[in-house]
Amino acid sequence: MAILSYLTTTHFDFGAIALLTKELERLSIARPFVVTDKGVRGAGVLDRAMSGYSPSDALPVFDETPANPTEDAVMDALALYRSHGCDGVVCVGGGSAMDLGKAVALLAGSGGPLSRFDPAKGGSRLIDQVAPVVAIPTTAGTGSEVSIGFVINMREGRKLTFASPKLVPRVAICDPELTLGLPALLTAATGMDAVTHCIEAILSPVVNPPAEGIALDGLWRAWRHLPRAVADGSDREARWHMMMASTEGALAFVKGLGAVHAMSHAAGRLQTPRLHHGTLNAVTLPAVLRFNADTSREKFERIAMAIGLAPRADLAEAVTMMNRSIGLPAGLAEMGVSAEMIDGLAEFATRDLASRTNPRPVTRADYTELFHQAL
């Protein structure tokens, strides 16, 4: 039996940010806590996002979000949230800010420690309350504004994925205006994150045809508009479609993800080098597509048609060529990953939650080979 769930409200279009005050009032958030990062704040994007809120003075803001959110950063933000007596979280930024903000909301509502909510150990059942979250994306890739989970680097070295319908933000405000002028490399990396979400959601063996339809539509939009968005950061049409593709990717991966994300999560926990999640997805996707190629010919053909290729086209090669055309690294070695790191990476990937919904079982030996291929 399939269970089909799409659980939040999304305001989507240029100018949507003007609805922030109204939505905070609707959710009875009187003392919002803002989670962002220094890049978003320094570029003036936070001010643009919060221009829809009145009054905007004296709001507590946590802007120390790391590129890969950590448990320590979550606890620092939670302390600030509590010290100001806040009653809701406004996340402004990319996936990192939204993941950290969700973690704060979870601990504010249900108490800690964070590790007790590990879904792999049945921790999702322990979630009681979650403080209301309003998510405002400033990149187009993660889709965390509508997703059921978040990812945190834990103190003991694991990168954990926390998932529950209770973690979906109460409202998402998707205003493509906030992504205009995003640097080309970040546009490329986050865009390939959205592409990967759509592809892995389609290939997941979980039965949810509506989610697959959403993923195919998102993939169609992303594949056609990503090169345009990379080439011209002010292309409003391309930015609109990329933000929609990002949102659709996250709506679709309610089905689960796969080995690409297991590998990205494993590599993303490294302290050195510090690696961007979307770029990791982009450079590992071709190897995983080859690994999964014989699992569902029909799904591979539908993916090929969505991106404008012949049904029997080589999807792995198409992704490789896309990565090259938008300026992303050719492999993990170019990002600073060495062969000596692979044993440890394979171990963590094997235990990652995303590995469970890969269309083909993946052993530790398989992950070792996949990492070597992705170098």
Image (spheres, grey):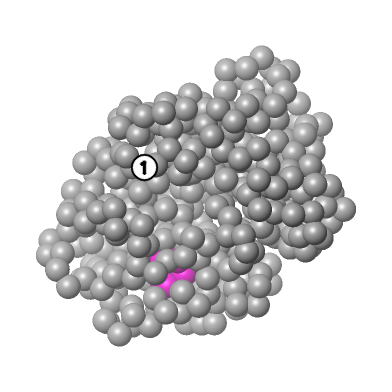
Q: Give the residue number, with chain letter if any, for mark 1.
A: 182
Residue 57, given in percent of the width and then of the height, sits at 14, 68
Q: Is residue 206 visible?
A: no
Rendered residue at 12%/65% (across/down): 55
Vertical order, 91 against 260 (above or below): below
Rendered residue at 63%/26% (across/down): 321
Give whichever of 218, 340 is nearer the camera: 340
Give whichever of 332, 124 is nearer the camera: 332
Q: Residue flagged by tag 1: what amino acid is it?
A: Leu
Give whichever of 37, 297 is nearer the camera: 37
Left or right: where does residue 236 sit relative to residue 226? left
View extreme (bottom): residue? 83
Give whichever of 301, 324 is nearer the camera: 324
View extreme (top): residue? 310
Rendered residue at 56%/52% (across/down): 277
Q: Main secondary structure of the magenta part?
A: helix
Vertical order, 29 against 169 (above or below): below
View extreme (left): residue? 55
Q: Is residue 14 visible?
A: yes
Could you tell me which secondary element the residue under label 1 belongs to?
loop
Residue 6, given in percent of the width and then of the height, sits at 46, 47
Q: Is disc 1 surrounded by few (<14), some (14 to 19) or many (20+) residues within 10 Å?
A: many
Residue 103 sits inside the magenta stretch? yes
Among the 4 quarters of the image, the one containing residue 350: bottom right
Residue numbers of the magenta segment = 100-105
Residue 19, given in percent of the width and then of the height, sits at 20, 50
Left or right: where does residue 366 sit relative to residue 39? right
Residue 77 sits inside the magenta stretch? no
Left or right: where does residue 205 sit relative to residue 45? right
Rendered residue at 33%/78% (across/down): 81
Among the 4 quarters of the image, the one containing residue 345: bottom right
